[in-house]
Image (cartoon, rainbow, N blue to C red):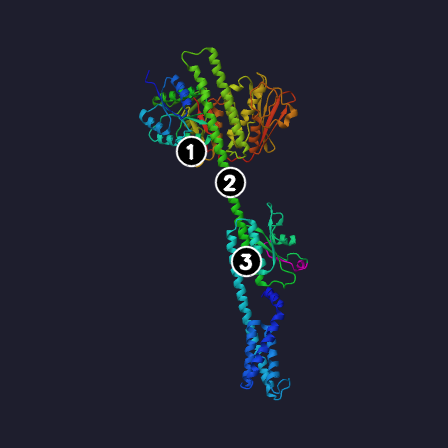
Amino acid sequence: MSAPAKVLLIEDEKQIRRFVRVAVEEEGCQVIEAETLARGLIEAGTRQPDLLILDLGLPDGNGIDLIRELRTWSDVPILILSARTQEDDKIEALDAGADDYLTKPFGVGELRARVRAVLRRRSRSPDSASPRIEFGSVVVDLSLRSVQRRGENMHLTPIEYRLLSVLISHPGKVMTQRHLLREVWGPSHVDRSHYLRVYVGHLRQKLEDDPTQPQHFLTETGVGYRFQP
Amino acid sequence: MSPDPLKTERAGSALQTYTLTCAACATTTMLATPLYAYLDSANIVMLFLLTVLGVAVKLGRNAAVLASLLSVLCFDIFFVPPRFSLAVSDIQYVVTFFVMLVTALTTTHFTSVLRQRAQEALRREQQTQALYLLAKQLAGVLQLEQVVEISASFIRTQLVAQAVVLLPDEGRHTLSPVPFGAPLPVEMHLARVAFDSGRFVRSDEVMGMGLAAFYFPLKAPMRMRGVLAVAFPAEAEAPGDATLSLLEALSSLIAVALERLHYVEVAQATEVRMLTERLRSSILSALSHDLRTPLTAMVGLADSLFLVKPTLAPAALETAQALHEQADRLASLVGNLLDMARLNAGEVRLRREWQLLEEVVGASLKLLGGALSKHRIRVILPPDLPLLEFDAVLIERVLCNLLENAAKYAPEGSTIELRAAVRDGHVDVAVLDEGPGFPMLRKAELFNMFVRGEAVSGKPGTGLGLAICKAIIEAHGGEIDVENRPEGGARVYFRLPLGVPPSIEEELP
């Protein structure tokens, strides 16, 4: 067993820090706490955490600035804690480079699941350069540009394929509409969110067992999409 | 040429003027009499001509004409032999009289023309001064009443006339006078014509009826601001061009002042609204943060009791679970209340985007997850449903509320159906259940806040769900209603306008 993963928790509310610490430690992680953004940034630099849990509503500044700053020199996964009413902040934080978010209030079970997922991705990502990705009954081979479902070749249009490859290359990460539109259609299309909806619909029709209740191409309403392997 | 006010003034003192003229001639005669022995008669004529000149300068044309005649008469009677009689001994004097009269009258004419010009120039200067002063006053004014008062008093003092300002109502349908001083009866029809056409309107017929006869549109750069109605006293002469153009200048000054006031008002109202909005949203977000933080801690801390080592007794864990659930309920209540407050404030910013209904339905079902696990869920959506323009987060909330309600009231194991259909320019979305249905007697109240279907109910809930749905749907320009199904169970449906979805460029194969 390697050294326990280090989780940096930036949260001003003591009681929330307390239960988050208990929950994260239960996942076998070591927890570093910071009460302010300024402290958090220092800890992030010196302790090199494997995951950052950041409350967006800190009194000493804008958490989004911290994400931007951090992203200039680190790709540590960032999990945001935010209130439901902060849709715009959430999107901004995700666009700035955050990976996932939890809406307050959240249960310990939910939190542990997210932490586990992020850490699993992290431990896997360096050597998972395999061009073959499997989810459900679908196999995608990025080197052959082939998509198979239940052993049958599926025909995807170029845009569908491009969207699929962007989504599956960031498993578990919430991707904002803006980000996906820019990646797939280019910067001139970032306002045409209906394109994205229609094409995600196509992917679901072709690759999900029940397109109305998707298991892999999940909607984060008002924010974007998440690919769940 | 508009000498009317001056003429009136002159008419009043005509008697005095003529008396003065007579006195001037008499004085000249008396002064000249002792000099008769020393002066040539030609020089005495000069004295009289001097008098006429003086009278012309000081007292005006009519007086000077009188003075000319009197001078000739006095000269004849008192200085031409035979003295003290009209008779003339030497016929030469007839030439003297003639020349004297012609000289006097010519002097009179030129002097009085000059005098009139000078007076006119003076009056113009005074009016310009007054107009300038008025413009300065109007520029500093902050209230409508002041504009009216300043303009009316200008017209009263400068033109000896009465005036009233008529302003349109909100919808610009009717004009009504701004109350100030003595009411001036106006002919509304003429005012309306001036307002609509933007042209000056006068009617000499209504003047006799004591109504204002002159209507000047108050035309400001952006739009027509009202009408200025002016009435001159009945006994005065009709106003000349100069007066009318003065009134036109005045009208545009008033119009600009009114427009300025309008925009001052608009700016103030905007500022007040902005401040109110900012205050409200900062209160709401502070409240939402302050309530949510302890609730988050409560939910999480209750959960963390499950992680305590050694494991707590089952009774303690049950309590922890109950704590979690209660805190969750409280959180959803707080969420609902804050949402309702936001929606009620009427200024929810809809993030309308073109959406697939299917996707939002899927997201709602996933979000509810466990809450629906005890029911069969059937989703029936037409395959060709067009894109709909709505705020996905809010419509997701409506769907969740409706599905959750259905799951709460319908018996376990029954089927909950979600259907959508396109019908004349709308899409109807309905949630159907096999529960007890709604008490139709209180149907109208169902969408009110804090009203729940069952008066005494063991089911948890706040009675805010349907009220929030209604507020959201109405913000989208739709409608929501409930009915009971003939086969039993409730049907809640909402209707959204279809709109014209944006086109999607076909992908090149």
Query: Marks 3 and 1: in contact by CB < 8 Å?
Result: no
Residue B163's spot in the image, x, y percent?
A: 60, 56
Q: Nearer the viewer, residue B243 or A163?
A: B243
User: Which residue corresponds to mark 2?
Assistant: B272
Judged from the image, the secondary structure of the residue bearing numbered disc 2 is helix
Inter-mark Cα distance, 1 to 2: 40 Å
Q: Chain of mark 2?
A: B
Res. B357 in view: no
Q: In terms of sequence position, does the residue under pointer 2 or pointer 3 come before the other?
A: 3
| Amino acid type, callout 2 | Val
* Crowd band around label 2 with a 10 angstrom C-alpha radius: few (<14), some (14–19), many (20+): few
Q: Chain of mark 1?
A: A
| Amino acid type, callout 1 | Arg
User: Which residue corresponds to mark 3?
Assistant: B249
* Highlighted range, magenta: B197-208
Q: Nearer the viewer, mark 2 or mark 3?
A: 2
Question: Which part of the image, by quadrant, shows the C terminus of chain A?
Answer: top left
Residue B502's spot in the image, x, y percent?
A: 51, 35
- Looking at the image, the residue that sits furthest to the bottom is B90
Is A192 placed left or right of B162 in the picture? left
Query: Which disc number belongs to residue B463?
Result: none
Task: Work out whether disc 2 and disc 3 sit on a shared chain.
Answer: yes
Q: Nearer the viewer, residue B88 or A125?
A: B88
- Looking at the image, the residue that sits furthest to the front is B34
Is B441 inside the magenta-drawn segment?
Answer: no
Q: Chain of mark 3?
A: B
Judged from the image, the secondary structure of the residue bearing numbered disc 3 is helix
Inter-mark Cα distance, 2 to 3: 35 Å
User: Which residue corresponds to mark 1?
Assistant: A182
